[in-house]
Amino acid sequence: MPAPMAVDSQLPPLKILPVNSASESKGSIHDDEKARAMGYKGGLVPGVTVLGYMSRLMQETFGARWQSGSTFHGRLRRPVYEGAEVAVEGTVVEAPAPGNDNTVTVELKVVDADGVVAAFAQATCRV
Amino acid sequence: MNEENAPAGTPLTPYTVTYDRAAIDQYLARSGEPAEPYIHVGRLTVPPGMFLGAYGRLIHGTFHYEAGVHTSSEMAVAKCPPEGTVATVSGEVLRTFEQNGDKYVTFTVVVSDEAGDVCARMEHSSIFSLRSRA
């Protein structure tokens, strides 16, 4: 299936069951005990893992083109917890054209089980 | 880490990392994705999302803080080298600041391959002193 390029078109979404790969890092915010003491529900899934979900969606949509000459600006808004499924979504906001060096711009977000945006990003990919 | 020992321009201790098959497989297992999309001309390449994770050892190898929270990342990917690449990770502190009782650090990260070519440049922000949410 060709990658979506038109403005407002949606990237094929992903559903991911997060894994907290740093839960054994005692005393860190990924450690259940420490995170609860700080007022969180449990250990936080590492931010780089969550941002990586959006990179994964770009890779699965644009393939090798995502791996050179691309940019990514991501922000983490809310904690993501292990085992609470998230959805990763993307919308094309600027179509590739000669005037933008044939670059597609996509707004991405990670939506948690409560329907709240946990992380968002803007990514560009030369196509 | 504090504002006094991490002024702008403070270099972070560089390190080398081998992006071998085991490391890539470990990353893919964490993000729950298959390897196939990253295989080009029969060779597995480093996923761009893997560069994002290079910051942890860089900042924590230079400064000590425990309950930090990663808040944002900017990344420009120049190329994703093949598996087996030995990369150098380096960077420096850009700024520290305080917002809503949390103390933040922003720093750069550059991942380069054996030839010295830049694979990715990043700018990360992280809370190094977190106010309690309790």
Image (tube, coloured by chain):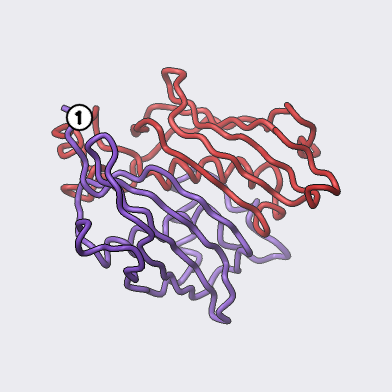
Chain colours: A red, B purple
Between B58 and B17, the residue placed more toward the observer is B58
Judged left or right of residue A90, residue A86 is left
Q: Is residue B129 depicted above or below B14 in this figure?
A: above
Between A57 and B60, the residue placed more toward the observer is B60
The single residue placed furthest to the right in the displayed view is: A98
Q: Is residue B4 depicted above or below A15 in this figure?
A: below
Judged left or right of residue B109, residue B121 is right
* The quadrant where residue A14 appears: top right
Judged left or right of residue A51, residue B38 is right
Classify mark 1: helix, strand or loop: loop
Q: Residue at x 50, y 46 (%)?
A: A52
Judged left or right of residue B78, residue B101 is left
Name the residue tied to disc 1: B133
* The quadrant where residue B119 appears: bottom right
Q: Residue at x 56, y 61 (%)?
A: B46
Type of residue at label 1? Arg
Q: 10 Å neighbourhood of mark 1: few (<14), some, or many (≥20)?
A: few
Report the number of discs: 1
Q: Is residue A1 depicted above or below A52 in this figure?
A: above
**Looking at the picture, how far across and down is residue A58, in whole percent?**
63, 43
Q: Residue at x 16, y 39 (%)?
A: A34
Tell which subunit mark 1 falls on. Answer: B
The single residue placed furthest to the top in the displayed view is: A114
Q: Is residue B21 depicted above or below A124 in this figure?
A: below
Q: Residue at x 44, y 21 (%)?
A: A116
**Looking at the picture, how far across and down is residue B74, in whole percent?**
51, 50
